[in-house]
Image (cartoon, rainbow, N blue to C red):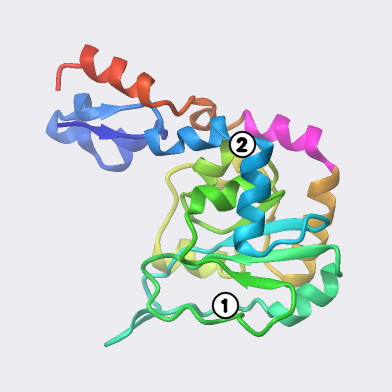
Amino acid sequence: SALLTAYEKMISSFRLDKSHKEDIILETGYPRNDALFKFTDEDVKRIKEEVGVPEDKKVILYTPTWRDNQFKKGEGFQYNTELDFNKLMQQLGDEYVLLFRAHHQIGFKDVANDVPGVIDVTLVDVNDLYIISDLMITDYSSTMFDYGDLKRPMVFYMYDLDEYQGEIRDFYFDINELPGPIVKTQDDLVNAICETLKSVEFYEHSLRHIPTMDIVDDAQHFLDSYEQADV
């Protein structure tokens, strides 16, 4: 058996070297991400129609992850955030639509169904959402690695960074190497969205700081690597 990854620090993160199991890791990327390299304009149009996204809107995807300290017995992990969706959409204006996708670990997800310009897409295939989005907002989610395949802008909304890093978890790499701005307030988030969409050239340069995002995800790549590996 083998563990596929697009993340070069997986061995050290799971301390596989301690148990001499480094060889079970195959840095091939994920075959499920093949769709991110093979979609067409017709696919984009179809998905937007299915989701209900107008053609003339800029599409922002928001994919926050779950927090270990936000668990409620009988319901699972909660979604508690400082983000005011109504205010956000007022600040951004009518030219934007926000796709909200809750993490599958979160038990309560109905957070923005009544906000104009916000669509809850929690049950939509995340690859489809990547494809139709112009920019992604995330925090500590691994969606950054998948979305990085598209080399599109990202903004990292880490309103609870100090608590997350100091009390909940830490990080596997220097977050200052992330391919996009880190913001802690909603006003800074709005500014970062607007500025990042204008700075694609700067963004593509930043993306190269995380080499894991340069791995081509391809099912054949995996099969070739698996056949050559001693696992």
**At x 60% / y 60%, what residue is drawn?**
50
Q: Nearer the viewer, mark 2 or mark 1?
A: 2
Measured as percent of width and height from the top left, residue 209 is found at 61, 31
Residues under numbered marks 2 and 1 in contact, where contact means CB atoms less than 8 Å apart: no
Q: CA separation, marks 2 and 1?
A: 27 Å
* Residue type (three-letter) at the residue carrying disc 1: Thr
Left/right of residue 227 with respect to residue 219 in the rendered view: left
Q: What element carries label 2?
A: loop
**At x 72% / y 48%, what residue is drawn?**
134
**At x 69% / y 78%, what residue is drawn?**
85
Measured as percent of width and height from the top left, residue 157 is found at 63, 62
Residue segment shown in magenta: 199-208
Question: Residue 150 has which mark?
Answer: 2
**Is 103 situated above or below 208?**
below
Measured as percent of width and height from the top left, residue 82 is found at 62, 78
Q: Give the residue pinned by disc 1.
A: 81
